[in-house]
Amino acid sequence: MSVSVALLFLELFTLVTMINISFCIANSNVACIDSERQALLKLKQDLNDPSNRLASWNIGDGDCCAWDGVVCNNFTGHVLQLNLGNPDPNYGTVSKLVGKINPSLVDLTHLIHLDLSGNDFHGIQIPKYLGSLKNLRYLNLSRAKFAGVIPYQLGNLSNLQYLDLSENYESQVESFSWLSGLSLLEHLDLSDADLSKATDWLLVTNSLSSLKVLKLSYCELHHFPPSSSANFSSLKTLDLSKNQFNNSLFQFSSWVFGLHNLVFFDLSGNQFQGKIPNGLGNLTFLRHLDLSYNEFNSAIPGWLSKLNDIEFLSLQHNSLLGTISSMGLENLTSIKTLDLSLNYDLAGKIPTSFVRLFTSFEELSIFRSLDKSTWAI
Ligand SMILES: *[C@@H]1O[C@H](CO)[C@@H](O)[C@H](O)[C@H]1NC(C)=O
Ligand SMILES: *[C@@H]1O[C@H](CO)[C@@H](O)[C@H](O)[C@H]1NC(C)=O
Ligand SMILES: *[C@@H]1O[C@H](CO)[C@@H](O)[C@H](O)[C@H]1NC(C)=O
Ligand SMILES: *[C@@H]1O[C@H](CO)[C@@H](O)[C@H](O)[C@H]1NC(C)=O
Ligand SMILES: *[C@@H]1O[C@H](CO)[C@@H](O)[C@H](O)[C@H]1NC(C)=O
Ligand SMILES: *[C@@H]1O[C@H](CO)[C@@H](O)[C@H](O)[C@H]1NC(C)=O
Ligand SMILES: *[C@@H]1O[C@H](CO)[C@@H](O)[C@H](O)[C@H]1NC(C)=O
Ligand SMILES: *[C@@H]1O[C@H](CO)[C@@H](O)[C@H](O)[C@H]1NC(C)=O
């Protein structure tokens, strides 16, 4: 091989390498869009930030894609995600962002993920203009001191898959009709909002066929709707705890028992009375069943022993009758937590075979919750 041919190869190699390198640089260095940087700066201006979480958001620093909490599209430079949730799991005051949400937020037209959870927006209403962020797939405004009526304009967010508005204790929903536009919704959490006027809650959620998680805990619901069947059969988690349901289990039975894929079911803290409905025995995938703090006053149903996957079962604080031994405890091979305490008319001993089961799973701690004054083990 002559020297010149070798040089040519060397040059070609260098060229290819350089092209590769320059591609890499181009990929990671798309600077953010100027109008979106301006929008972010306005957002920052209206927020009090005692722990300096937004310290990297500087007028002098051109590339807002590198700012904390901001994720851009690597090719277009558009802001895709704004992760401004309070990083302190205890929602510490110091790490809160406090203040207003500047309406320039809507200039981030490509936003798909918005998390403002755990901050303090001083009891304002959730801004109606959030309904124009049409690309949003994830919206988390949990525990951020929003108050008042949740605006129906959020029903314009037809790409939404996750909507978490929980723990805004002064908020309310008067009708669920706007939610019917959110056909891709998989996760809906409106816990702690006042839904006492929203009598259409089941009618509407039932039409959301993608729904997997529905959490309406502590919502002042008192009407357990007498719908005959449930369309949201993909539902895996249903939390209706701490409401005021009290009507007859006949109505309650009609649709709940069709939720065959349910894994997590919490009905604790209501006012259900009478017999624990047999239809619950059809929900054979259940891993977590919480019926505590109700007024069930039947014997413990034998079908509980058919729930092969059950890991958590609480019947605490009801008025259950009869004996524990009728329960078929030894067949609950997956159980990790069992709470039968505060049922003062319940008698009998935990079978030693069951105790042995627990010992082998190293989960004896559950017995701490049992009321030892009532039962010897
Ligand atoms: C170019 O980049 C690709 C992917 O990163 C890599 O597989 C390839 O080996 C690189 N080519 C050269 C010549 O460095
Ligand atoms: C952008 O690129 C970075 C690093 O090259 C990568 O970690 C990140 O996942 C990419 N982001 C998107 C939205 O593709
Ligand atoms: C919601 O959509 C309707 C019609 O599609 C439109 O008239 C309205 O302005 C939108 N609202 C918001 C807040 O984007
Ligand atoms: C919303 O944020 C809270 C607090 O950061 C978190 O616990 C919750 O899981 C989030 N919700 C969703 C649907 O991701
Ligand atoms: C249930 O789903 C079917 C088919 O998807 C639909 O025609 C029907 O209207 C739905 N019913 C309710 C109550 O949403
Ligand atoms: C059920 O609750 C409603 C509304 O909270 C109340 O008016 C009614 O008296 C209650 N019924 C029973 C049987 O407790
Ligand atoms: C429970 O399942 C059985 C058998 O699959 C069925 O006959 C019964 O109607 C179901 N009960 C309810 C309340 O859905
Ligand atoms: C426990 O399971 C066995 C085998 O599946 C069955 O024969 C027995 O009847 C069950 N016991 C109770 C109390 O359900």
Image (cartoon, rainbow, N blue to C red):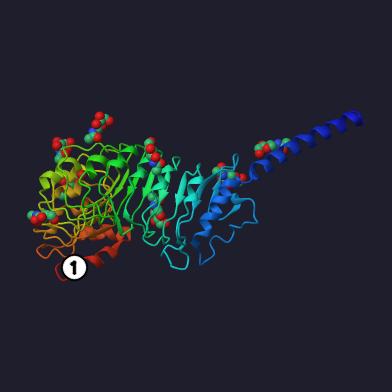
- Indicate left or right for 319 with 82 as reference: left
Position of residue 245 relative to residue 251, above or below, is: below
Residue at 21% from the left image edge and 39% from the top image edge: 258
Q: Amino acid at mark 1?
A: Asp
- Looking at the picture, how far across and down is residue 288, in whole percent? 27, 52
Residue at 25% from the left image edge and 59% from the top image edge: 356
- Looking at the picture, how far across and down is residue 139, in whole percent? 41, 48
Q: Nearer the viewer, residue 105 or 22?
A: 105
Position of residue 251 relative to residue 345, above or below, is: above
Does any portion of residue 281 appear in the rendered image?
A: yes
- Indicate left or right for 295 with 262 as reference: left
Residue 218 occupies which quadrant of the picture?
bottom left
Residue at 44% from the left image edge and 40% from the top image edge: 134
Q: Nearer the viewer, residue 349 or 83?
A: 83
Reading the image, the residue beneath label 1 is 371
Neighbourhood count class around disc 1 (C-alpha, 10 Å): few under 14, some 14–19, many 20 upward:
some
Q: Is mark 1 within 8 Å of ligand 8?
A: no
Query: Which structural element holds mark 1?
Result: loop
Q: Residue furthest right?
A: 3
